[in-house]
Image (spheres, rainbow, N blue to C red):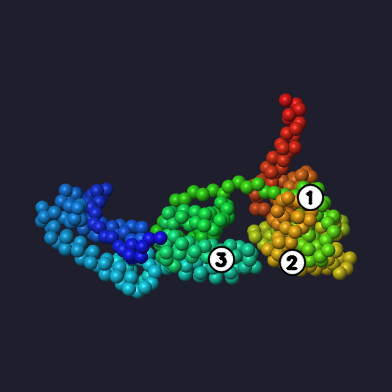
């Protein structure tokens, strides 16, 4: 950790920019402010010939007849910056180099701070829960905000910064912080970063951020293997003798997800209105997915029908009634069930959705387009991943045959 006096120090220097020349053949003089490992250049509005600039002292040489006036202006600018810096220091409020620059430039209103901005947007997200987003999505945005606060303290030693201070470097440091300090996986860290990107979209649109720092970074999601249960593993779970009604209900909810492909949030919301009786006496589920609002059409196969009937107070599955605990509690119970069934894979509610897509449907010849419709995917492109998983399994199963017929 840096010594306190280093964190409080500011360094000012004047530079003559050779990269630009005005119509008179002169170069602009800029003030470089360095503070807490960051630096910012401010145009002073003054010009001089490159050969008249004395870099060692940051002044214009006396060979320029306007040197006394220019140098006095440079002293005045430096004095002003020092004064603004002292005011911010004595206010005892955290600030960044961007806030200092805004103050030097005479901007009356302080820039919007990042934590305040994220807090306001989080309230907006929470109000959408149950309308077009799930609680889990809200929790993800809330976690993103908390991670940003933790990052600012850990990396920047401040509790807040201006929204305008977010740069490509900031985002990459934040991503690495999520991976290394918070132990998030690559894709999980990317999801948090995307939450921040979505939240800041309005700030970028309004010009609070002069450019979009997300355009300057390129982090792609890594391909992951989506595990699923085999038919044998499903049968082992079905045949388990469980002594607890609570654990048994968890098992039944999980199996129902395996047989229908419904996500946790959609099972939680499922009611009699989503169950449709067809003219041929069979049933199907017609439900708008909580996550995408796309309607899923899912025939209720006999195994799923029996589960609904088990929790109905009559012979009509429309009367089913069960208590669906939190996703965390279900997954905790599923861990126990997996151990009892001697299944080495980690059981969780989303694994059931993968199982429906692979073992229950695609493995039994259900067309990709039909599976996509049942899963409520926006396009078959989202469903193709499961087909790829099956292709890999086919290759693995044929490995011994390949060895025989070489």
Label 1 neighbour load within 10 Å: few <14, some 14-19, many 20+: some
Residue 241 percent across, percent down from the top left? 85, 59
Q: Secondary structure at mark 2?
A: loop
Task: Determine the residue positioned at 67% across, 49% down.
Answer: 226
Label 2 neighbour load within 10 Å: few <14, some 14-19, many 20+: some
Which numbered disc flags the more N-terminal residue, 3 or 1? 3
Res. 165 image quadrant: bottom left
Q: CB atoms at circles 3 and 1 under 8 Å apart?
A: no
Q: Which residue is mark 1?
A: 233
Q: Secondary structure at mark 1?
A: helix
**Observer able to see residue 180:** yes
Q: Which residue is mark 3?
A: 142
Q: Is residue 185 left or right of residue 105?
A: right
Label 3 neighbour load within 10 Å: few <14, some 14-19, many 20+: many
Task: Determine the residue positioned at 67% across, 58% down.
Answer: 294
Q: Is residue 399 above or below residue 154?
A: above
Q: CB atoms at circles 3 and 2 under 8 Å apart?
A: no
Q: Which residue is mark 2?
A: 324
Residue 17 percent across, percent down from the top left? 25, 51
Q: Is residue 287 left or right of residue 73?
A: right
Q: Secondary structure at mark 3?
A: helix
Q: Is residue 259 left or right of residue 48?
A: right
Task: Determine the residue positioned at 76% across, 51% down.
Answer: 343
Nearest the camera: 39 or 3? 3
Most extreme residue toward the top, as rendered?
Answer: 406
- Looking at the rendered image, the disc whose residue lies closer to the viewer, 3 or 1, is 1
Label 3 and label 2: CA atoms lie apart by 23 Å
**Observer able to see residue 373:** no
Which numbered disc flags the more N-terminal residue, 3 or 2? 3
Residue 359 percent across, percent down from the top left? 76, 47
Which numbered disc flags the more N-terminal residue, 1 or 2? 1
Label 1 and label 2: CA atoms lie apart by 23 Å
């Amino acid at each position: 950790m840096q010594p306190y006096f280093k964190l409080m120090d500011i360094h000012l220097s004047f530079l003559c920019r050779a990269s630009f020349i005005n119509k008179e053949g002169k170069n602009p003089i800029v003030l470089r402010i360095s503070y807490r490992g960051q630096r910012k250049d401010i145009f002073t509005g003054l010009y001089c010939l490159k050969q008249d600039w004395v870099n060692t002292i940051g002044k214009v040489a006396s060979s320029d007849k306007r040197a006394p006036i220019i140098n006095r202006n440079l002293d005045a600018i430096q004095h002003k910056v020092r004064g603004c810096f002292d005011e911010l220091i004595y206010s005892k409020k955290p600030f960044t180099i961007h806030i200092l620059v805004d103050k030097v430039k005479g901007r009356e209103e302080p820039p919007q701070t990042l934590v305040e901005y994220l807090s306001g947007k989080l309230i907006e997200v929470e109000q959408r829960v149950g309308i077009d987003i799930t609680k889990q999505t809200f929790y993800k945005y809330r976690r993103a905000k908390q991670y940003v606060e933790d990052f600012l303290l850990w990396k920047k030693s401040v509790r807040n910064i201006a929204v305008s201070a977010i740069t490509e470097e900031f985002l990459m440091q934040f991503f690495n912080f999520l991976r290394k300090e918070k132990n998030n996986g690559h894709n999980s860290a990317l999801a948090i970063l995307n939450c921040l990107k979505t939240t800041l979209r309005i700030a970028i649109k309004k010009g609070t951020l002069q450019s979009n720092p997300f355009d300057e970074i390129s982090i792609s999601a890594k391909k992951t293997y989506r595990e699923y249960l085999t038919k044998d593993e499903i049968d082992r779970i079905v045949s388990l003798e469980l002594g607890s009604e609570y654990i048994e209900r968890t098992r039944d909810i999980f199996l129902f997800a395996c047989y229908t492909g419904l996500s946790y949030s959609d099972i939680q919301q499922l009611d009699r209105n989503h169950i449709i009786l067809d003219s041929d006496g069979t049933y199907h589920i017609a439900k708008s997915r909580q996550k995408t609002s796309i309607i899923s059409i899912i025939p209720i196969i006999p195994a799923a029908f029996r589960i609904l009937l088990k929790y109905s107070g009559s012979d009509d599955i429309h009367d089913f009634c069960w208590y669906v605990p939190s996703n965390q509690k279900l997954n905790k119970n599923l861990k126990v069930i997996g151990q009892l069934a001697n299944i080495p894979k980690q059981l969780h509610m989303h694994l059931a959705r993968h199982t429906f897509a692979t073992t229950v449907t695609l493995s039994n010849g259900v067309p990709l387009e039909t599976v996509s419709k049942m899963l409520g995917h926006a396009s078959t492109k989202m469903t193709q991943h499961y087909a790829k998983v099956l292709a890999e399994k086919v290759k693995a199963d044929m490995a011994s045959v390949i060895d025989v017929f070489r």
